[in-house]
Amino acid sequence: MTTLDVAFAAVGAIAAGSGLLAVTTRHVVHAALWLVVCLGAVAGCYLVLGAEFVALVQLLVYVGAIVVLVLFALMLTRAPIGPNRELSTGRIHRLLAAVLGAAVAALLAATLLPLADGVVRRHEIPNASLAQDIFGIWVWPFELLSLLLLVSLVGALAVSRLVGGAPGREGRR
Amino acid sequence: MTLHLTGPYLLVALLAGLGTYGILARRNAVLVLIGVELVLNAANLLLVTIGASGGDRWSAGNVLTLFVITIAAAEVVIALAVVLAVFRLRGDVDLTVERSSDGALPPADEREGAR
């Protein structure tokens, strides 16, 4: 056990525990808040693995933007406050889901764990060379992604306008 | 600075399994999205782990993680627009209740039987 192993075990345990609570809790809002904890712990994992820039982007975009969007959606769909048994499916369905989830985890672990033999040196990428790679090798995918963000923004507007527009216009007449 | 890769790989498997459970076992559409986010994070963690072990070229592990985070943001925007549109049409976002094509609920006794 090296120092990094101990640090990773700590943040990894937080991530796994809060992830479990995020998918099993009976409170709608608590699920989103446990997701915050889980994503923050995953950002900590990135820090331990030596990817500072990715950790900061994870905090900014995931915790700062995506979870806020999820919370907004919960509020706008009038999610009930307080414990609610109706959030999850029936017992047999949940048992089947747990079996499938465990099967996915076991399959991934069986595939990945044989690859992890021995101690590796942490390979750190300085931010300057990461920037050179993004704007050198990866510049076209990067530009395409900005186009994707624009398209998704327009698409979200179109979806909410097209569906909500028809009854609203009827009502105004 | 050295480390074992067993821990990261185990966490990847756990997060992917938890996300799959969340996708399958939740009825609220927004909570299904939370499961999707967990699976995406498992994929990101795997990419960063590969980057940290030095097994990639052109810092692909880190750069692809940034790309996946961006795509996840775009996906969540579209998904939440669809969820809000469904909520305006049907009045709830329960994914398990069967409805006829005009969005009306079936009679209450049938719904109880379906559960």
Image (spheres, rainbow, N blue to C red):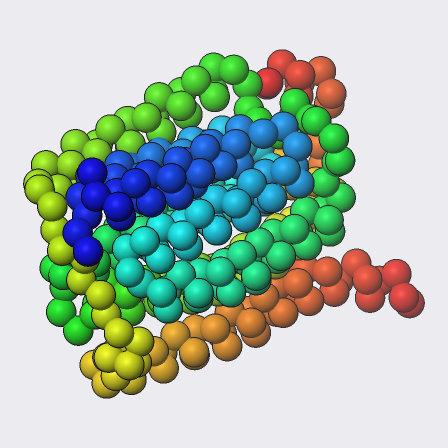
Q: Nearer the viewer, residue A12 or A135?
A: A12
Q: Is residue A87 left or right of residue A44?
A: right
Q: Nearer the viewer, residue B19 or A7?
A: A7
In this rendering, does residue A145 appear at all?
yes
In this rendering, does residue B71 appear at all?
no
- The relative height of residue A89 versus residue B5 in the rendered view (above or below) is above
Image location (x, y in percent) of residue B102: 68, 42
> Image quarter for residue A142?
bottom left
Image location (x, y in percent) of residue B50: 19, 55
> Image quarter for residue B66?
bottom left
Q: Nearer the viewer, residue A166 or A51?
A: A51
Image location (x, y in percent) of residue B67: 35, 67
The count of marks equals 0
Residue for point 60% across, 52% down:
A70
Image location (x, y in percent) of residue A34: 56, 40
Q: Is residue A104 left or right of residue A77?
A: left
- The relative height of residue B113 versus residue B71 in the rendered view (above or below) is above
Q: Is residue A42 left or right of residue B5?
A: right
Q: Nearer the viewer, residue A30 or A154?
A: A30
Residue for point 36% across, 65% down:
A52
Quarter of the image with the N terminus of chain A in it: top left
